[in-house]
Each structure stands twice: as C-alpha cells, then as structure tokens.
Image (cartoon, grey):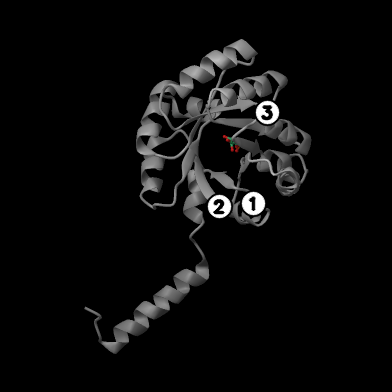
C-alpha cells in the first residue's frame, strides 16, 4: 500500500520524507487555507521535495475553469496530479486531462456509483472519504470494499486512494479492504509505529542487555 501525506505543511512533509516510507502528497483548498501560504508556491515547493505524486486541487467548479486551472497546475511540475471534484463537469475535465496525459485525482467521492463514473472517466485516483461518511453514521470502510469489488470486476486501472482518514485503525482497515493508497494526516502517520508492548519489550531488552556487560562492537 502506498502512503501519501494529507497536508500542505512543508515542514511535516520534509520530516516524513526522512522515513523513506512516503510515496506522495495530497492537498486540498482547506489545507492550503490552514497553511496561510500561497497555493502555487506551496505546490512547487512540495513537488521539489517529494518525487512521487502531489495532488493539487482546482478551485473552479465549471468545466472551462477546471480545465484552465488544471492545465496550469499540471505545468508547475511533472509530478502534479490534478484534483477534481466528483461532479459532471469534474468528470468531463477528468476525461480531458486523461486525454492529454495529465494525471487526475477525483475527489469528494461518497458512493460506489460515483467511483464507477470516475473510473469510466479515466481517473488516475479515486478518493473515497472514509471519515466524513463515518461522521454521518455511514460505513466509510464499506465504500472502499465496494469500490475494490467493482474495479476488480472490470479491471479498471484507477487506484483507490482512501481519504479522510482519522486514525490508525482506518489505515489498517483500508489496507485489508484493498485500497491502493491511503492519504494520511501527519499526526496519524507518526502514530502508526507506536505500540505500548513494543515500548515495554524494548525497555526490557535494553535493561537485560546491560546486565550482560557485553558490547556488540
Ligand atoms: C483527501 O485528499 C482530502 O484532502 C482529505 O483526506 C479530507 O479529509 P478530511 O475529511 O479530514 O478533511
């Protein structure tokens, strides 16, 4: 499973790149607003740090606007993936980008039918939002499972990018459900490694090793 980090904070991205486990980045207008920085500068900076795919979302909601903005964003760096909303115009823009060889991430997916449409439009990634479905008492993870089944039934190449991840259990559950990618907030990525029994076990090994009085080197 590929790990993307869901943030527009460049310092977090630099830190997580050092793990060697980061495959890409996703941003959205809310994350850009939170960063307080210029969108185009942030995208260029992230693309220079991360060699993998970096999703940058259009702001327009009409077809002509999405195409113009998407092509501009795609021109910023080779690894930009144009993020488009799951609307009819977004799907048309997706078809256009795909025909031009531009990678796309169709976002704000909340149903299996929407995911089917995105695959038919040639999306590189589909982003089902797990957490936001859980928020309204629906089963976010069931959507990942359903999309996996549909895409496998028809051998669609669109990758399932599990989004709106709220905690570590979402990551493992999305992996079990067969998501190709998880886009994860930085604080959740940091928690993935932690287990109290690992900490306890390591403290025990360190203490016992000390008692041996030996050294390996
Ligand atoms: C996906 O690309 C989105 O940026 C993100 O996962 C949305 O998550 P949220 O529901 O926590 O805002």
Which of the two discs, 1 and 2, sits closer to the camera? 2
Q: Nearer the viewer, residue 83 or 124?
A: 124
Looking at marks 3 and 1 on the same chain, the residue that comes earlier in the sequence is marked by: 3
Whether residue 38 is visible here, answered yes or no, is: no
Whether residue 190 is visible here, answered yes or no, is: yes
* Residue count near mark 2 (Cα–Cα under 10 Å), binned few <14, some 14–19, many ≥20: some
Looking at marks 1 and 2 on the same chain, the residue that comes earlier in the sequence is marked by: 2
Residue 195 position, x and y percent, is: 52, 65
Which of the two discs, 3 and 1, sits closer to the camera? 3
Secondary structure beneath disc 1? helix
Question: Is residue 201 found left or right of 48 in the rendered image?
Answer: right
Which residue in the rendered view is the most extreme toward the top?
A: 64
The residue labelled by disc 3 is 121
Residue 205 position, x and y percent, is: 39, 79
Q: Nearer the viewer, residue 138 or 63?
A: 63
The residue labelled by disc 2 is 1
């Amino acid at each position: 499973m590929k790990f993307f980090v869901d943030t527009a904070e460049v310092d977090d991205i630099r830190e997580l790149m050092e793990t060697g486990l980061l495959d890409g980045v996703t941003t959205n207008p809310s994350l850009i607003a939170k960063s307080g920085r210029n969108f185009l500068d942030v995208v260029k900076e992230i693309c220079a740090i991360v060699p993998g795919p970096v999703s940058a979302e259009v702001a327009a909601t009409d077809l002509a606007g999405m195409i113009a903005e998407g092509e501009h964003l795609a021109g910023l760096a080779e690894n930009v993936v144009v993020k488009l909303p799951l609307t009819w115009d977004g799907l048309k823009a997706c078809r256009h980008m795909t025909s031009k060889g531009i990678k796309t991430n169709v976002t704000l997916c909340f149903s299996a039918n929407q995911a089917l449409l995105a695959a038919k439009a040639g999306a590189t990634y589909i982003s089902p939002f797990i957490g936001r479905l859980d928020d309204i008492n629906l089963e976010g993870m069931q959507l990942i499972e359903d999309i996996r089944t549909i895409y496998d039934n028809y051998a669609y190449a669109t990758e399932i990018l599990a989004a709106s991840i709220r905690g570590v259990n979402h990551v493992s559950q999305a992996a079990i459900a067969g998501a190709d990618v998880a886009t994860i907030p930085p604080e959740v990525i940091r928690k993935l490694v932690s287990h109290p029994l690992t900490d306890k076990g390591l403290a025990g090994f360190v203490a016992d090793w000390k008692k041996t009085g030996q050294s390996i080197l």
